[in-house]
Amino acid sequence: MSAFLSRLRGGAALPPVPPARVIALSGLGGFLAIAVVAGLAEGLSQALVLGSFGASCVLVFGFPDVPFSQPRNVVFGHVLSSFTGLACLAVFGPHWWAAAVAVALAIMGMMALRCVHPPAGSNPVIVFLATPGWAFLLTPTLAGALVLVAVALVYNNLRGPGRYPAYW
């Protein structure tokens, strides 16, 4: 038991604080992405915003070089996870255990298809809370994720010398 408890202490040092410029530019990117997605949603009277998109912005603008932040991961991760939630809702009904099955299947699917995007793991939970129809796959999931990625492609390539995406 003490060996297990000793693992809970950790052991690594905290990562360094990013430079203030990186912090500010990351926040600005998240602001712009959500502003564009939410503004389009309001202007078009369409649902384009998911709560998980805020967490997507943390990755896409704060850590654009990591695999979780790449466009294929953002778009396919969100779509696959929403699809999994909708399918489990349709097959099993709105039960607590079905939501858990949907999250597990979404994780497994994203891993198997190499499109892991951690914020998308919350999409099945969102599906079970909102109980939307199949149109949820197009709006807000696909359309919102595509707009978010479009903003990230422009913004991340204008803000500095890095390249986004690292891969498709």
Image: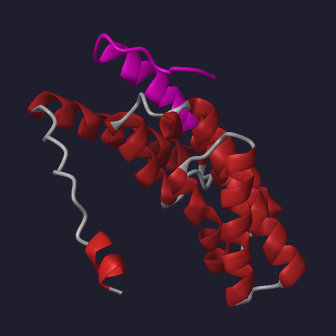
Q: Is residue 127 above or below residue 114?
A: below
Horizontal and vertical percent position of residue 44: 59, 45
Q: Which of 37 and 104 is in front in this view?
A: 104
**Furthest-top residue in view?**
161
At horizontal 72% and vertical 71% (from top left) the residue drawn is: 102
Horizontal and vertical percent position of residue 155: 38, 23
At horizontal 86% and vertical 75% (from top left) the residue drawn is: 90
Horizontal and vertical percent position of residue 96: 67, 88
Left or right: 13 in relation to 138: left
Q: In this view, does 152 lie above or below 36?
A: above
Q: What stretch is highlighted in magenta?
A: 147-168
Quadrant of the frame with the C terminus? top right
Left or right: 40 in relation to 125: left
Q: Is residue 57 rendered magenta in the image?
A: no
Does the image show residue 133?
A: no
Horizontal and vertical percent position of residue 95: 73, 89
Q: Which of 116 and 143 is in front in this view?
A: 116
Q: Which of 9 and 17 is in front in this view?
A: 9
Does the image show residue 108?
A: yes
Q: Which of 2 and 61 is in front in this view?
A: 2
Left or right: 88 in relation to 10: right
Quadrant of the frame with the N terminus? bottom left
Count up the numbered dots: 0
**Furthest-left residue in view?**
20
Q: Which colour scheme is used?
A: secondary structure
Q: In this view, does 72 lie above or below 55?
A: above
Q: Is residue 71 above or below residue 8?
A: above
Q: Is residue 155 rendered magenta in the image?
A: yes
Give residue 163's quadrant in the image: top left
At horizontal 51% and vertical 21% (from top left) the residue drawn is: 165
At horizontal 36% and vertical 35% (from top left) the residue drawn is: 63
